[in-house]
Amino acid sequence: MKAIIIAAGMGRRLRPHTDRRPKCMVEIAGKPILHHQLDAFRAHGVDDIVIIRGYKGGGIQAKGVRFIDNHRHRENNILESLFCAGPELVGDVIVSYGDILYRPSVVGRLLGHAQPGVLVVDTAWRKNYEGRTDHPESEAELLRLSPYELVTEVGKQVTSEGAVGEFIGLARLTSGLVGRLWALYLEALSAGRERPYGNAPTLRQAYLTDLLNDAIRHGEQLGVCPIAGDWREIDTVQDYERATKEWT
């Protein structure tokens, strides 16, 4: 099992903490966000780890990992950043956003699911948004499920009414699904990076959730790994300040 961490973003809303370092190297509870992630993976035997870096990428300090550079991180978004992985994006993989904290137990639960695609979903998501004024509920990547507990839609366009939880930015994808996602991405790429894709104005600015929704429309069955807490997104200074008090 391989883990790919998308850590190319500039972290503008986390300034001044990101003025001189990438977002994933901001420290919470005595160590960088990235190191919390690496510890969570390695606790469950996931040692093959690739980091997609961009903004101040040379400042990422981590042993035993491989780096891929997103040279256009100022122009693109999460989806394009992920596919910078190129030949590394093959086989069974865990994909993680680079600005989230999660307990090792979350990785363990994710690995316990055998479906082709599994998204980690916080069913107690509303609690995280109490007093979170700088990152309101409208920015959450919420999702809906079918009666068979398969994802029918995920992303910021999903309203809280009828949503079962928030996709935290951590997913497990098996080899066959990864290949089919590549096919969908390349099809979109052939139409041009400046063409709309999913809910994004352009492919260049698309999110991972835009690709996942495309896959669902093409018949892919994505399951969920439910959790209730045990994670934090560090997107704003307010998030940082709350996490430094609450995360141990």
Image (cartoon, rainbow, N blue to C red):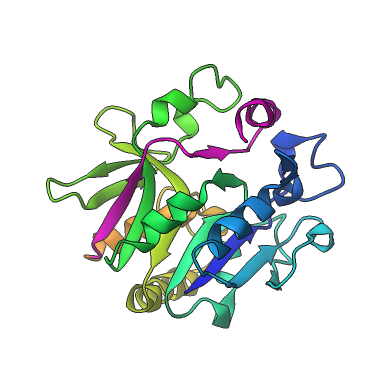
Name which residue lies at 21% across and 65% down. Answer: 219
Name which residue lies at 77% across and 51% down. Answer: 22
Return the residue found at the far top: 131
Examine the structure image and report whether residue 231 is included in the region drawn in magenta: yes
In the image, residue 60 above or below residue 156: below
Q: Picture coordinates of residue 63 (x, y %)?
A: 74, 68
- Decide which of 190, 11 is in the foreground and name it: 11
Return the residue found at the far bottom: 87
In the image, residue 62 above or below residue 91: above
Q: Which image quadrant is residue 57 in? A: bottom right
Return the residue found at the far right: 20
- Is residue 194 among the parts visible in the rendering? no
Name which residue lies at 33% across and 55% down. Answer: 213
- Is residue 104 among the parts visible in the rendering? yes
Q: Give the range drawn in magenta.
A: 220-248
Q: Which image quadrant is residue 27 in? A: top right
Q: Picture coordinates of residue 136 (x, y %)?
A: 51, 25
Q: Horizontal placement of 230 versus 9: left or right?
A: left
Q: Picture coordinates of residue 232 (x, y %)?
A: 55, 38
Name which residue lies at 27% across and 65% down. Answer: 115
Count of number-bearing discs: 0
